[in-house]
Amino acid sequence: METKYSIVKKSIKSKILDGTYEPHQKIPSESEMMRQFNVSRHTVRLAVGELVSEGWLYREQGAGTFCADRTDQQRKEAGSRKNIAIVTTYISDYIFPSIIRGAEAYLSDQGYHVTLFNTNNDHEKERIYLEKIITQGFDGAIIEPTQSAFTNPNINYYLNLERLDIPYIMINAYYDELEPVRVVVDDERGAFLQTEHLIENGHKEILGFFKTDDMQGTLRMKGYLKAHREYGVPITPKHIVTYNTSGKHTKPIEEFECFLNQQGPHPTAVVCYNDELAMKLLHIIREHQLRVPDDISIIGYDNSFLAEMSEVKLTSIEHPKSDLGKTAGKLILSMISRKQMNKDAGEEVQSVIYSPELVLRQSTKKISTPSKSLQDAT
């Protein structure tokens, strides 16, 4: 359990790191902090005293306690370490190792050391790693945002990165309000291609599964809806299943089971948020003794190694993976170089948006009627 003084100390330090307390700004008085944290004067003095001794704060006799200016020290550290932070939602799962390898290999070739951080799509972990990036002298950072579809509680940390002139770019998604340099796939277009392929093959009753606490999922849902509208296919609201990070292992499975167990006509095709989900749904389909694609078509996203692991090879949308990582590495070094030369030197670094492509395999097929019932197969 955290001590009271450490809670006070952490809170003050976080306010420094997220830019709430700017250099030479006076921090609240001891009395104010006593009321704010409901602690004794001794506890406040202990927390503030440690921050003064560590160089985060300084005192002026008769005037109070102020936030120290650590900018020059941080810039000196950043200039000598050649260290890049890579922050992703996951490290060892799914397509993330390929993305990280692409970035790491390129940066290593350029003489940079890479430090990996894994947020597990959790805002508190993201905050901790942003504090490390600010305090540990990183030259720059490649960051996959956490729960990018939502307003982020750590936005001030990103603004402080900008104030401190620490370059960062975002991959796979981005926080729209920051308008950062980013390397992403056109996810709306990707899901449009998924859905268009099924519609062109006669499917009208198409389930869509989308993880909507990340920008990728909201854009993919938008592409799914756009394809229905452009082809004049009515949208069935109950055919759209949304879920978030905490429910990703349960909700899609439960919802899909309900669709397969219902009486009457069933959907004839499924658009999946990614290949990982598609593999889970394929397992459920087999348990119901249904066949892919004869009874139901299914299409994934990311063209991961999973797409060819099953006995039914998965039609999917290509993701650049390693190449995306390498491109991210190139862009962050371009931003660092531009900063070192002077921001007015050279062209401004531009975002890169990959155009998705459909990779056809065996998990989808043309149907002869607009809406096929699976009732006979169950």
Image: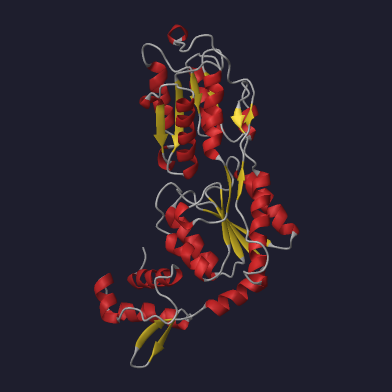
Name the residue furthest top.
Answer: 376
Seen in the picture, residue 123 relative to 342 is either above or below; the reply is above
Seen in the picture, residue 162 relative to 150 is either above or below; the reply is below
Residue 150 seen anywhere in this rendered image of the structure: yes
Which residue corresponds to the image point at 44% horizontal and 42% vertical from the top-left?
Answer: 245
Q: Nearer the viewer, residue 62 or 268?
A: 268
Residue 307 place in picture, x, y as percent: 62, 29
Residue 279 seen anywhere in this rendered image of the structure: no
Which residue corresponds to the image point at 68% horizontal and 49% vertical from the top-left?
Answer: 102
Q: Is residue 4 left or right of residue 86?
A: left
Q: Nearer the viewer, residue 101 or 176?
A: 176
Residue 347 place in picture, x, y as percent: 66, 62
Res 274 → quadrant: top right
Residue 135 place in picture, x, y as percent: 53, 70
Seen in the picture, residue 220 relative to 202 is either above or below; the reply is below
How many numbered circles are shown?
0
Q: Is residue 129 left or right of residue 324?
A: left
